[in-house]
Image (cartoon, grey):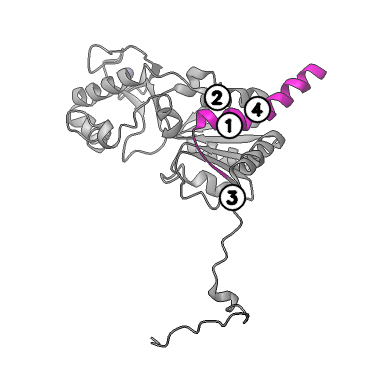
Amino acid sequence: MSTQADPVPKQGSKAPAASCLYVPPPVEGYAAALARGRDLVRDAPSAVVLTGAGISAESGVPTFRGPDGLWRSFRPEDLATPAAFANDPLLVWQWYDWRRERIVVAKPNAGHRALVELEQALGPRCFTLVTQNVDGLHRLAGSAAVIHLHGDIWFVRCTVCEERHEERSVPLRPLPPRCACGGLLRPDVVWFNEPLPAGALEQAMAAVRATDLVLVIGTSSLVYPAAALPKIALEAHIPVVVVNLEPTPLWHSATVALQGAAAELLPQLVEGKVHRAVKAAQER
Ligand SMILES: [Zn+2]
């Protein structure tokens, strides 16, 4: 390495070579980014929305990870597994019962409702909602069709005959619950070391490939395979709008990235689209 000091340019002399300079990209103002996002939503004939824990957290649903997810000193990784259920189904069910008690008091927020409005504005054939959340808040808000990548905590499935049905009792008794066939029921959610529900990811990927716009809401975009969805869109030059409280790994590749709450930003993003749909219906 040279010990020679960098030459100091004399006043009035030419600036150092461009390769020495870091020229930051122009920073788009927040208002301009929001306006771009609104335009993209308004003009898109179809859309796919991927939601994650962020939108649920705004409704008060704990993430069940980290300190606020601890129950009797167990970590989710120790309970949400097929092995843990096989070993002690009562313990796993007690944990799910505790989680269901915490989720049942949560109400959908303005972000969930904005997605219902977007679904209605686009129509069911041009709108796909994919969620990593198991809390059922999209369904409760009124979203008609939801792809649950990680299952739904309000459904149970028989470990013997595979029969699946909705079960909303809180608390659920007796534990562990049993099917009419006598088999143990389990929560119809995806556990660690388990594959996603049959067809869910394929359906989501097909929807992304066929859409005009992808919205990624309240997810770190880190957890595969859900994280693959925005990547597929970007590779196909489909615009991606990201909304999250914190920047995510998608931040710089997204078409528009907005830092903030889904409950605050989603109503603003879909407003123009909903307005146009209402106007079109009135003119008919
Ligand atoms: Zn059964």
Residue 151 versus residue 201 in the image, above or below: above
Instruction: Decide if residue 218 is in sight here.
Output: yes
The answer for how far apart the CA atoms under marks 2 and 4 are is 21 Å
User: What residue is shown with label 1?
Assistant: 128
Rate crowding at label 4 as few (under 14), some (14 to 19) or many (20 or more) other CA atoms within 10 Å.
some
137 on left or right of 234: left
| Amino acid on which disc 1 is placed | Thr
Q: Nearer the viewer, mark 3 or mark 1?
A: 3
User: What residue is shown with label 2?
Assistant: 145
| Amino acid on which disc 4 is placed | Glu
- Stretch in magenta: 257-284
Q: Secondary structure at mark 4?
A: helix
Q: Earlier in the sequence, mark 1 or mark 2?
A: 1
| Amino acid on which disc 3 is placed | Leu
Majority secondary structure of the magenta segment?
Answer: helix
Q: Nearer the viewer, mark 3 or mark 2?
A: 3
Q: Position of residue 157 (x, y in %)?
A: 35, 22
Q: Give the residue at the far front of this rendering.
A: 11
The answer for how far apart the CA atoms under marks 3 and 1 are is 17 Å
Q: Give the residue at the far right of this rendering.
A: 283
Q: Are marks 2 and 4 in contact (CB under 8 Å)?
A: no
The answer for how far apart the CA atoms under marks 1 and 4 are is 18 Å
Q: Which mark is residue 208?
A: none
Residue at mark 2: C-beta within 8 A of ligand 1: no
Q: Quadrant of residue 224?
A: top left
Q: Is residue 78 magenta?
A: no
Residue at mark 1: C-beta within 8 A of ligand 1: no
For image coordinates 37% across by 13% down, the residue present is 168
Q: Are marks 1 and 2 in contact (CB under 8 Å)?
A: yes
Q: Earlier in the sequence, mark 2 or mark 4?
A: 2
Instruction: Decide if residue 184 is in sight here.
Output: no
Rate crowding at label 2 as few (under 14), some (14 to 19) or many (20 or more) other CA atoms within 10 Å.
some
